[in-house]
Amino acid sequence: MAGLWKQIERRADTLAVVAAVFAALYLVLIHWNVWAVDFSALYFAGQFFGAGDLAQVYAAPPEVIGIQMPPAWVAAVAAVGHGGEQTYPFIYPPWVAAVMAPVARFDPQAAMNLNLVVNVALVLGSILLARRIIGAAIALGTWMLISLALLVPGVPLMSALLLGQTQILVFFLCLLAFERYIAGAFFAAGVALALAACLKITPAAFALIFLFDRNGRALAAFMVSGMVMLALSYAVAGPELHLTYLSHLRTISAYIYASFFAFSFETFLFEIWNAVRGTAPLHIDNEYIFAKPGWISVMSTLGLLIATFVLWRVTQRVDHRRRTGAQLLGLALIVAIFAPLGWAHYYLLALFLLPGVLVVMPLRRAMTLLLIVWVTLSVPFQSLFFDVALPFYPQILIMVPVFLAALVALLASLNSAKPI
């Protein structure tokens, strides 16, 4: 196998360039002129903000997430010539609506196409950043080929591009932050991570790495930058929109959003519990919303805390040049698994970093893990279960154990390895 690996590396650089170009063209072409429902939330929130109709920026159904559209949003979609298209509620900090206001002056489909091109470029950039963080021991061409093989056929990337997800930008900023951190640019690292956390809150969890390292400069840059951005957001949008945003986040945390591409530990537990009790409906729709039992949150929080503590302990033996990458990969899995929603695209950060298991695991074990993730996350495999009416989503019952197994395998390999 070692000889085969050497041959692959020798040819990988040329193949990687060709593969990256074709992958980028393919991803753009198949999503071109597709109505991106998640991006549409940003677009119309920006439109309402620009028009001064602030009451509509966070208009949403009672459970916040859902397909029900407020009448004003239905009218806004129709007014720009796309009547009948779906849009979802805006669940971002208010400053994002302010930034999107100028964008909303253009045709929404043109804005979506531009966002698609930017997102594809960010994906390629993220692959390069991830390799600089965790995979310097792997040839660049080999890293690119493995990454494209994992990402392009997979549900996380396809769903993110289809939806026009800002999560791609968020994870690019996270990777940029830790690429700069490893390079010793601690101020830039803190600022980049703060910007990611000001788009979506969960990247703030990655500041734990600054705490693990007792790096006060990076942590201070993160905290001060975050406070400055929050102050600017208040200055631009005022307190009322911020209170509504926080209220929406509290509402979301009170529900289980079960969907065929919601791979969270919370949803996994609830799907099993609901099916065993015989109270689950046959899953024939794309999404179901349930009130969240308190014990689900407790179990998920315990899982998050225990996994994070174990990650910190096992990475103390790792040389600081590799420790950051191992910790970021571990946290990327932990946060995606134990976060309340767990949409498939939340795993993109872990997938960008996952080829790094070739550095920290024996080759056969690492290749086996990558193969399992590649197969089970692929659109063809996931599609096998689309028309299966069961009292649970098979995709959830498959993918959550797969990602948990990946996390356990990573932690075990870091713990058993000689100090490096």
Image: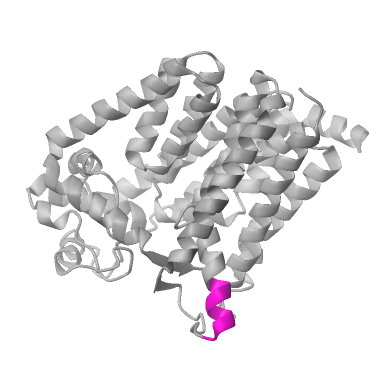
Query: Is residue 389 within the magenta segment?
Result: no
Outermost residue, top direction? Answer: 184
Image position of 261 (left or right of 195): right
Q: Can residue 236 be seen in this view?
A: yes
In the image: residue 141, left or right of residue 396: right
Give the residue drawn at x 42%, y 52%. Answer: 32
Q: Position of residue 89 (x, y in %)?
A: 27, 59
Residue 269, position as x, y percentages in the image: 56, 67
Q: Compared to 157, does 86 lie above or below?
A: below
Task: Say how the picture is coloured.
Answer: one colour
Which residue is found at the position 46% from the left and 51% from the top?
161
Residue sitting at 41 percent across and 55 percent down?
A: 163
Q: Nearer the viewer, residue 191 or 207?
A: 207
Query: In the figure, 80 relative to 365: above or below?
Result: below
The residue located at (48%, 58%) in the rendering is 298
- Image location of residue 386, percent across then percent down: 57, 74
Q: In the rendered image, which quarter contains the C terminus?
A: top right
Asked if residue 229 is positioned above or below residue 187 in the image, the reply reads: below
Q: Which of 77 and 270 is in front in this view?
A: 270
Residue 274 covered by magenta stretch = yes
> Is residue 23 something one can see in this rendering?
no
43 left or right of 154 in image: left
**Image spot of residue 138 (x, y percent):** 74, 27
Establish if 398 lies above or below 148.
below
Span colored in magenta: 271-278
